[in-house]
Amino acid sequence: MRIVALAGGIGGARFLRGLKDVVGPDDEITVIGNTGDDIHLFGLKVCPDLDTVMYTLGGGIHEEQGWGRAEESFAVKDELAAYGVGPAWFGLGDKDFATHIVRTQMLGAGYPLSAVTEALCHRWQPGVRLLPMTDDRVETHVRITDGAGTRAVHFQEYWVRLHAALDAEAIIPVGADTAKPAPGVLEAIAAADVILFPPSNPVVSIGSILTVPGIREALAAAPAPVVGLSPIIGGAPVRGMADKVLAAVGVAAAADAVALHYGGRGAGTPGLLDGWLVDEADAAAVPAVEAAGIACRAVPLLMSDPAATAAMARAALALAEQVRR
Amino acid sequence: MRIVALAGGIGGARFLRGLKDVVGPDDEITVIGNTGDDIHLFGLKVCPDLDTVMYTLGGGIHEEQGWGRAEESFAVKDELAAYGVGPAWFGLGDKDFATHIVRTQMLGAGYPLSAVTEALCHRWQPGVRLLPMTDDRVETHVRITDGAGTRAVHFQEYWVRLHAALDAEAIIPVGADTAKPAPGVLEAIAAADVILFPPSNPVVSIGSILTVPGIREALAAAPAPVVGLSPIIGGAPVRGMADKVLAAVGVAAAADAVALHYGGRGAGTPGLLDGWLVDEADAAAVPAVEAAGIACRAVPLLMSDPAATAAMARAALALAEQVRR
């Protein structure tokens, strides 16, 4: 079976680990990773979501933190601060720096990000094929207003430095309009047997992937069933600050609202989903989702341990079979 | 007093520390640093000699090793090796990496190396004005012959990876023919009250600086006395493998031969030196040097401790006064 999953960072990566636990040795997983939160720091190209997937599936992740490397040190960061070179709010560890150094060197030598990601994965052996959504530069910016007026800041500045404490007035995928899907992305979607939306951020993770022209269309046209998992439980994001960026696109922080935002692929609708999983706490949301032509089930959606995560993946695959046309 | 010193790496840096100990608060030291052994590693611009001077005078040097940072860690290097990215023979520590990251980022932003060096020194406060010999890319290559045939390798590969175990057949300053002295270099030489050649490598350190068109001419025309210190004691380099590269330019590893290689500024000669210090062990070399029109003194030249190094600097300045025209 060929499974395609769109993924952001921590939530997506953890779900993928559960998915790997439940698929068979002949199943193939292709991950289309968000690169909208990529950022250039200290002259280096940093791809937080791709790395979180790679480290998580490759066994190098800082488990408690969810991002970055385990057993990390911070000598480079401290030295950069001693030089007065910032930003200080983005905490790159020494091991992590090496990844960005290799990536930047390869990009500088002319390799596209997809080839660089493949090279990095040659070490990590994540057990999935990890594709960036695009080889082109796309950067999610967030429009905010504070005492200094209204302006757009890089998503990482909004998320990491400002802790999403200000309202996100708009989400601006800079460069997305001219970006092309990375090699293999459209082909993987077209050839998939199952397509999954892990419980990643619907706006700045999966939403970012959908801004690349051609990807949304390929998903809508794919013969495979498309099943998503709600990142919202009981009206709040499981982790992160997804509610802040959902508000920017006029979507309530609710399990059903997110499904309706993606939309159903039922007859006559231009949406993406055939199926949607909500947490048991949101069972009341099922009818509204199904009314939109999306098959919906309420199951436990907290990735509290590997077994719970694997059960979520199993439920998603089961729903995919139920909605297969 | 305005003192100009040409400097390579470890020997030059240690001498400069002694020089700083003996000059007065109103004296100004300008160091023209060798950049011929600069190398691009992992996409980063590494300037070993400039950094050795900066770290040594700024209090950050690994004292026993003579280069690199004190209390260094190697997480980045280990990670690069785990990615299979080399070379492994050039051991950059984590703290050192930060310097190269800052430098590379500034160069990428369009700043010339001289401005970058000034910015880095803003942190280190070396107490001297440190100028790269040029803002242009100059790389010393070494021609060697081994089982694979005759080829040219980067100086660092010859020095660090091959430990200068093969004969250096030629020293090739790639890019030097079109390089220009960095801003301030010629002006500092013209305005100097004393010009010193520390006991740095005469071929790949000071010799490299002299390959930049205009610097040799400026030294020859400078009104200030030019005094050098022999890096050769008793027929062998005090440290390093200077004899290997001296052979490549047809110069014996001897205190007098190096002086004659630089040449005397006496009437009718096109050389650079007014004065030359040899070690007491080489007192027999004095007549040959003086016969070339170079005032020569035999004094202790081992930089065994700060006091010995300061005495060397004092002897060099004293000789400069004796030969001042």
Image (cartoon, coloured by chain):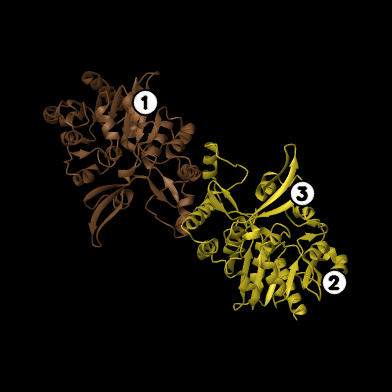
Chain colours: A brown, B yellow
Q: Are marks 1 and 3 in contact (CB under 8 Å)?
A: no
Q: Please indicate, yes or no, whether residue A189 appears anywhere in the rendered image.
A: yes
Which of discs 1 and 3 lies nearer the camera? The answer is: 3
Q: Is residue A207 found left or right of A41 in the rendered image?
A: left
Q: What type is the residue that disc 2 sits on? A: Glu
Q: Quadrant of the C terminus of chain B?
A: bottom right
Mark 3 Cα shell of 10 Å, populated few (<14), some (14-19), many (≥20): some
Q: What type is the residue that disc 1 sits on? A: Ile
Is A286 or A169 nearer to us in this picture?
A: A169
Q: Which residue is mark 3?
A: B169
Q: In the image, residue B225 lies at what x, y percent?
A: 73, 76
Q: Are marks 2 and 1 on the same chain?
A: no
Task: Please tell me the numbered disc located at residue B290.
Answer: 2
Q: Which residue is mark 1?
A: A29
Mark 1 Cα shell of 10 Å, populated few (<14), some (14-19), many (≥20): many
Q: In the image, residue A19 lies at what x, y percent?
A: 33, 25
Q: In the image, residue B268 lies at what x, y percent?
A: 81, 74
Task: Reply above or below: A319 against A207.
Answer: above
Residue at figure coordinates x 84%, y 64% from the top left:
B282
At numbered mark 3, what does the secondary structure look like: helix, strand or loop? loop
Task: Reply above or below: B125 against A91.
Answer: below
Give the total of numbered labels.
3
At numbered mark 1, what does the secondary structure look like: helix, strand or loop? strand
Residue at figure coordinates x 11%, y 28% from the top left:
A291
Q: In the image, residue B222 lies at what x, y percent?
A: 69, 75
At numbered mark 2, what does the secondary structure look like: helix, strand or loop? helix
Which of discs 3 and 2 lies nearer the camera? The answer is: 3
Q: Quadrant of the N terminus of chain B?
A: bottom right
Q: Are marks 3 and 2 in contact (CB under 8 Å)?
A: no
Q: Mark 2 or mark 3, which is nearer the start of the sequence? A: 3
Task: Reply above or below: B177 against A201.
Answer: below
